[in-house]
């Protein structure tokens, strides 16, 4: 809406009928027939739509509680609920739109903000996760390098779920093992490595440690509960 048009409408004596005001705008050429005159936004409740992969949609129910964080609001977490699960999937992405409603009484959340939603999908379970930098892609397959007895072994794994900075994997890998997360692209199976502390002295490696290794920095495999 042009500012001069708004001022003109406010100062038109006797033009109180909204239809006459709109006709005046049309006559001035500021609005086309069928065009939008003004947009009003109610932010007391905001709605978020997320694309959910088809393998998870069967777990989602109306009124499920979710948590939502926003890139533009560090440290802020909102609670919301699922109010709609669209039955028609995107034909290309094979995802289902899930719509979330979030109370926003203090108007902290603004229209257009980028959000990240955590949904209660399935039952809790335990799994082995590794830092995402531990994964190495070779020949179309993914591997991690385990440090054992001063050498590295290339172990095939299958990524399952990508989380914040880590990846759940399946394969011959267990909690407490040490994987290389830096320089692993240059390693080959059986290559000897030394595990160093921050002062450069050789030391032993145990579960829960993140020592510096020659050719890469090993990090222990974590277990997610």
Image: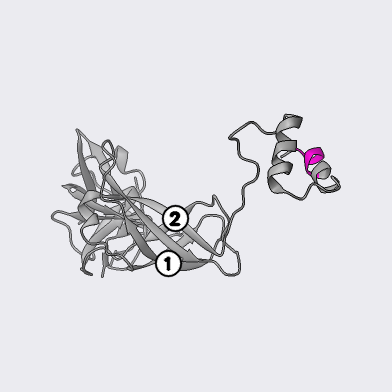
Crowd around label 1: few <14 · some 14–19 · many ≥20 (10 Å): many
Q: Residue at x 34, y 58 (%)?
A: 84
According to the image, what is the colour scheme of the structure?
one colour
Specify the quadrant that holds the C terminus: bottom left
Local SS, label 1? strand
**Observer-nearest of 40 and 108:** 40
| Residue topped by disc 2 | 48
**Observer-nearest of 20 and 93:** 20
- CA gap between label 1 and label 2 equals 10 Å
Local SS, label 2? strand
Image quadrant in which you'd find residue 167: bottom left
Would residue 114 appear left or right of 208 to someone viewing this image? right
Specify the quadrant that holds the N terminus: top right
In magenta, the rendered stretch is 2-6
Q: Is residue 100 above or below residue 32?
A: below
| Residue topped by disc 1 | 80
Q: Is residue 27 on the magenta stretch?
A: no
Q: Is residue 35 visible?
A: yes
Question: Residue 110: x and y, percent?
Answer: 58, 56
**Observer-nearest of 43 and 206:** 43
Q: Is residue 40 above or below residue 138?
A: below
Would residue 48 appear left or right of 192 to someone viewing this image? right
Q: Main secondary structure of the magenta part?
A: helix
Q: Residue at x 65, y 45 (%)?
A: 38
Q: Is residue 5 on the magenta stretch?
A: yes
Crowd around label 2: few <14 · some 14–19 · many ≥20 (10 Å): many
Question: Residue 216: x and y, percent?
Answer: 35, 48
Question: Residue 14: x and y, percent?
Answer: 83, 48
């Amino acid at each position: 809406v042009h500012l001069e048009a708004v001022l003109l409408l406010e100062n038109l004596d006797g033009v109180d009928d909204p239809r006459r005001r709109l006709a005046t705008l049309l006559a001035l050429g500021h609005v086309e027939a069928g065009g939008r005159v003004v947009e009003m936004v109610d932010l007391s409740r905001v709605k978020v739509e997320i694309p959910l992969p088809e393998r998870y949609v069967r777990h989602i129910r109306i009124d499920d509680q979710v948590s939502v964080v926003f890139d533009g609001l560090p440290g802020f977490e909102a609670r919301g609920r699922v109010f709609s699960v669209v039955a028609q999937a995107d034909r290309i992405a094979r995802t289902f739109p899930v719509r979330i409603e979030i109370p926003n009484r203090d108007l902290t959340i603004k229209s257009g903000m980028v959000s990240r939603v955590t949904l209660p999908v399935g039952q809790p379970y335990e799994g082995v996760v590794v830092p995402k930098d531990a994964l190495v892609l070779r020949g179309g397959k993914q591997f991690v390098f385990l440090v054992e007895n001063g050498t590295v072994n290339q172990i095939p794994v299958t990524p399952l779920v990508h989380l914040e900075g880590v990846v759940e994997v399946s394969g011959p890998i267990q909690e407490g093992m040490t994987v290389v997360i830096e320089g692993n692209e240059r390693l080959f199976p059986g290559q000897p490595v030394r595990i160093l502390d921050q002062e450069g002295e050789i030391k032993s490696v145990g579960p829960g440690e993140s020592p510096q290794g020659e050719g890469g920095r090993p990090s222990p495999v974590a277990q997610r509960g």
